[in-house]
Image: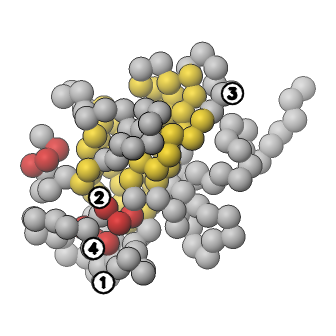
Amino acid sequence: MKALGLNPYLPSWEFVPDGEPHVFDGRVYLYGSHDSRNGVSFCEGDYVVWSAPVDDPGNWRCEGVSYRKDQDPLNGAPYEGELPVIDMPSGTPENPHLLYAPDVAKGPDGRYYLYYSLDFTNVISVAVSDEIPLSGNGKRYFSRCNDGAACR
């Protein structure tokens, strides 16, 4: 009999709620919000990705950050389009909106789309990547779509 743990597949120091697993190219990728140990709120961290081989689901590795709070225009990142109206002030580097419950889908164009929301906003945002996000080198990020134009 196996002993039960607080998190059966990620290290005990990692907090990835709202996890959404997807299989791309023989690996399971887990996308989720990112809590901080002893944080003052939920989802304080940037999005991280964990992955494991499909044939060895006990061998998880951290792929790194896939999307940062400071990449979003509602947190002050550059954006050429018109920003949506939200019922809260825009975030700042000192007080950014937090990243909630993401999901990823592979589009028919072969690109990977990150769907996410920020706390206290009425907006679902989309970011895009040409490759599997963070497929091992820790340097790829999603780039924020500009009114959908960059996502096509």
At label 2, the amino acid type is: Ile
- Residue at the far right in the pictured view: 1
Q: Residues within 10 Å of mark 3 (few under 14, many from 20)?
A: few
Mark 4 vs 2: CB contact within 8 A: no
Mark in the foreground, 1 or 4: 4
Q: Residue at x 41, y 48 (%)?
A: 66
Circle 3 SS class? loop
Q: Counting residues from the N terminus, which is met first, the one under dot 4 or under dot 2?
A: 4
How far apart marks 1 and 3 lie (CA) works out to 43 Å
Circle 2 SS class? strand
How far apart marks 2 and 3 lie (CA) works out to 33 Å
Mark 2 vs 3: CB contact within 8 A: no
Q: Is residue 103 visible?
A: no
The part of the image, by quadrant, that contains residue 139 is top left
Task: Please give left or right for residue 13 compared with residue 120 in the image.
Answer: right
Task: Please give left or right for residue 34 compared with residue 113 in the image.
Answer: right
Circle 1 SS class? loop
**Which residue is identified by label 4?**
76
**Which residue is identified by label 3?**
58
Mark 1 vs 4: CB contact within 8 A: no
Tell me residue 142's x, y (percent).
Answer: 31, 47
At label 1, the amino acid type is: Pro
Q: Counting residues from the N terminus, which is met first, the one under dot 2 or under dot 3?
A: 3
Mark 1 vs 2: CB contact within 8 A: no
How far apart marks 3 and 4 lie (CA) works out to 39 Å
**Which residue is identified by label 1?**
89
Mark 1 vs 3: CB contact within 8 A: no
- Residue at the far top in the pictured view: 55
The part of the image, by quadrant, that contains residue 10 is top right
**Which residue is identified by label 2?**
124
Tell me residue 60's x, y (percent).
Answer: 63, 33
